[in-house]
Image (spheres, rainbow, N blue to C red):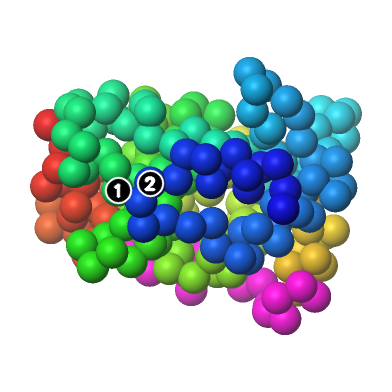
């Protein structure tokens, strides 16, 4: 078992597990040396950090989707929700940073106790709040598409140039996803993220967005 998975399991809430496909992803990350240590935690990436920093040109950057996997748990959820009600906070466990501005990916237990992968926008940048995937393999497929950061949504379209800069797909990661799980990688995220919603949307279709609306101070 990877160190990343071990550390995430230490902060999981009752009823939660690390899905087996994510365990395989964390093993791939560590087997390829795609991690650093920070404050006692192991932080995992999808692309070598040194190559990401050195591979930028005026019109292109390498690495596909930027995301950071680490065991955060729910210690900071009280700031996001504006309260400390355990019946709310204990249904979430953050396991990824999806954007440089502080957006998060988390496990969420819905009203039926089903574990789903959700997005929690920072509010200071991204406002995306929704279920990203019910199937962890679909979540991995979403990461393989090649959006610069998934926190900004725009899943109805394929990855586009960001501020005039093209994001070069992470070909090695894409190939690993195809061969490991026997799946294809869609051109856009719309086939995976069914009902993207934003903070404060009224009557959103997305179940996580509705739950957040009902439980935010």
Residue depicted at x 86% and y 30%: 50
Q: What element does badge 2 sit on?
A: loop
Mark 1 touching mark 2, by CB under 8 A?
yes
Q: Which residues are magenta?
A: 179-196
Label 1: few (<14), some (14–19) or many (≥20) C-alpha neighbours in 10 Å? many
Residue depicted at x 36% and y 27%: 76
Residue 13 versus residue 200: which sits nearer the camera? 13
Earlier along the polypeptide chain: callout 1 or callout 2?
2
Residue 195 versus residue 18: which sits nearer the camera? 18
Residue 216 x, y percent position in the rendering: 16, 37
Q: Quadrant of residue 83?
A: top left
Q: Quadrant of the C terminus?
A: top left
For this view, does 46 lie left or right of residue 215? Answer: right
Instruction: Give the alpha-carbon distance from disc 1 to disc 2, as whole Å.
Output: 7 Å
Residue depicted at x 43% and y 68%: 134
Residue 89 x, y percent position in the rendering: 27, 39
Residue 36 x, y percent position in the rendering: 76, 29
- On the image, numbered disc 2 is attached to which residue? 13
Give the numbered dot on residue 91: 1
Q: Quadrant of residue 139?
A: bottom right
Instruction: Give the residue at the far bottom of this rendering.
Output: 182
Can see residue 94? Answer: no
Residue 205 vertical placement versus 84 (above, below): below
For this view, does 36 lie left or right of residue 191? Answer: right
Q: Quadrant of residue 199?
A: top left
Residue depicted at x 47% and y 29%: 102
Label 2: few (<14), some (14–19) or many (≥20) C-alpha neighbours in 10 Å? some
């Amino acid at each position: 078992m990877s160190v990343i998975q071990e550390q995430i399991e230490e902060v999981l809430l009752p009823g939660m597990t690390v899905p087996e496909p994510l365990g395989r992803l964390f093993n791939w990350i560590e087997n390829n040396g795609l991690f650093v240590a920070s404050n006692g935690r192991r932080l995992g990436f999808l692309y070598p950090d040194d190559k990401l920093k050195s591979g930028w040109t005026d019109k292109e950057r390498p690495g596909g989707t930027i995301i950071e996997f680490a065991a955060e748990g729910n210690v900071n959820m009280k700031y996001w929700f504006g309260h400390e009600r355990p019946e709310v906070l204990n249904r979430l466990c953050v396991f990824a940073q999806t954007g440089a501005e502080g957006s998060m990916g988390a496990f969420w237990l819905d009203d039926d106790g089903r574990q789903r992968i959700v997005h929690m926008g920072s509010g200071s940048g991204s406002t995306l709040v929704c279920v990203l995937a019910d199937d962890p393999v679909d979540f991995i497929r979403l990461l393989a598409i090649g959006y610069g950061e998934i926190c900004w949504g725009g899943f109805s379209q394929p990855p586009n140039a960001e501020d005039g800069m093209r994001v070069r797909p992470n070909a090695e990661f894409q190939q690993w996803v195809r061969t490991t799980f026997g799946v294809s990688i869609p051109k856009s995220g719309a086939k995976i993220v069914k009902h993207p919603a934003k903070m404060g949307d009224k009557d959103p279709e997305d179940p996580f967005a509705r739950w957040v609306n009902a439980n935010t101070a």
